Image (cartoon, helix red, strand yellow):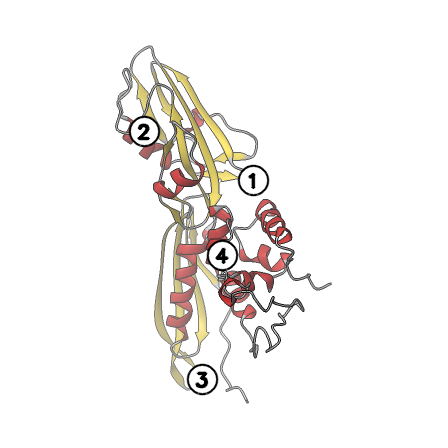
């Protein structure tokens, strides 16, 4: 099938970059493609950019979030909201424990948080609370990398220690993302599109990096679905990797049908796979280690988790091409 002679767009141009906000334009898009690309890129930006969030915390002497602490101006809910406003960068994929231990009287800001060299605090002047008397505040927090959103119920069910307070976790580092489309002239035609994207982040990642990551994610997703595959197995039950299904096995329980949610991955790994378009074990087996790393949100620890689970089932990822 011969392709139409469609003009290719320009690479993104920087219109304005000020602090954590950037405006970018892509020119020369074929009529209608401004909306197609703009909507797709925006959806990836708001759902699939990895970030960091506090998922649970323990406050000495406090049993639940609806408490007040003697000698501290703010109640526990206000302290938690202020802690959520602190922006972190984490190097590596390991869960990080950070600590706030302060004696009053004192105004506490994010710079008072103790952390390892793997953690950076972007907005160190962010206000947390004020100790108005000679009392101590002792808070231990779990800091995690992830994508999207996890409810406090999900956090509590899967990885909150007894006595800790679970938190809703919004991992996205993007505050706002929007796009506009206007017509432009190319040759004799005036109906080609110019796409303008406006991105604002929390400072842990630049808006330009967000745009580059979202475009690369879209390309990876589209490349993986180029071409057709006739069937996953033939009449003899031979899988695409050459293995053979047991004739007595229920097809519903075969690798073709098992969903990612049923494989007992950690929530972070499960969310990253599903966000990357991998919904079943069959889909996972089509990916190589390199393919998974290209999805974003899957670090070395997550890759090892996937490989160990597959190995326990006598399966393996596709080999990377040399």
Label 2 residue SS: helix
Mark 1 = which residue?
A: 91
Q: Nearer the viewer, residue 290 or 30?
A: 290
Residue for badge 2: 79
Q: CA distance from mark 3 to mark 4?
A: 49 Å
Mark 1 or mark 4, which is nearer to you? 4
Which is closer to the viewer, label 3 or label 4? 4
Work out whether 115 lies above or below 304: above
Q: Nearer the viewer, mark 2 or mark 3?
A: 2
- Relative side of 252 to 195, left or right: right
- 18 or 205: which is nearer to us? 205
Residue 187 circle label: 3
Quadrant occupied by the N terminus: bottom right
For image coordinates 32% across by 34% down, the residue present is 81
Q: Nearer the viewer, residue 280 or 238?
A: 238
Q: CA distance from mark 3 to mark 1?
A: 49 Å
Q: Is residue 103 above or below residue 87?
A: above
| Mark positioned earlier in the residue sequence (1 or 4) | 1
State which tag comes first along the sequence, 2 or 4: 2
Q: Is residue 245 left or right of residue 151?
A: right
Mark 4 residue crowding within 10 angstroms, few (<14) / some (14–19) / many (20+):
many
Residue drawn at x 31%, y 21% is 130
Provide residue 54's location: percent of width, then percent of height. Answer: 42, 36
Other residues around mark 1 within 10 Å, as few (<14) / some (14–19) / many (≥20): few
Residue at mark 4 = 260
Q: Quadrant of the C terminus?
A: bottom right
State which quadrant residue 80 falls in: top left
């Amino acid at each position: 099938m011969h392709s139409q002679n469609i003009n290719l767009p320009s690479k993104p141009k920087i219109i304005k970059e000020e602090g954590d906000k950037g405006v970018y334009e892509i020119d020369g898009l074929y009529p209608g493609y401004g909306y197609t690309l703009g909507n797709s890129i925006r959806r990836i930006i708001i759902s699939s950019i990895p970030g960091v969030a506090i998922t649970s915390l323990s406050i000495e002497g406090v049993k639940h979030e609806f408490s007040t602490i003697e000698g501290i101006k703010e109640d526990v809910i206000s302290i938690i909201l202020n802690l959520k406003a602190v922006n972190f960068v984490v190097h590596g994929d390991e869960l990080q424990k950070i600590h706030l231990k302060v004696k009053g009287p004192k105004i506490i800001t994010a710079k008072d948080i103790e952390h390892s060299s793997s953690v950076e605090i972007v907005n160190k002047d962010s206000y947390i609370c004020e100790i108005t008397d000679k009392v101590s505040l002792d808070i231990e927090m779990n800091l995690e990398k992830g994508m999207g959103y996890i409810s406090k119920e999900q956090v509590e069910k899967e990885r909150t220690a007894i006595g800790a307070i679970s938190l809703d976790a919004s991992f996205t580092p993007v505050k706002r993302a929007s796009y506009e489309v206007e017509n432009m002239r190319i040759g004799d035609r005036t109906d080609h599109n110019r796409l303008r994207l406006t991105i604002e982040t929390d400072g842990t990642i630049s808006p330009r990096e967000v745009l580059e990551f979202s475009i690369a994610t879209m390309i990876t997703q589209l490349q993986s679905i180029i071409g057709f595959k006739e069937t996953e197995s033939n009449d003899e039950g031979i899988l695409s990797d050459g293995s053979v299904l047991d004739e007595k096995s229920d097809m519903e329980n075969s690798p073709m049908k098992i969903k990612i949610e049923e494989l007992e991955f950690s929530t972070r790994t499960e969310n990253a796979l599903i966000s990357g378009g991998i919904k079943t074990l069959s889909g996972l087996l089509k990916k190589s280690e390199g393919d998974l790393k290209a999805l974003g949100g899957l670090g070395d620890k997550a890759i090892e988790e996937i490989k160990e689970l597959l190995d326990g089932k006598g399966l393996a990822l596709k080999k990377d091409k040399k």
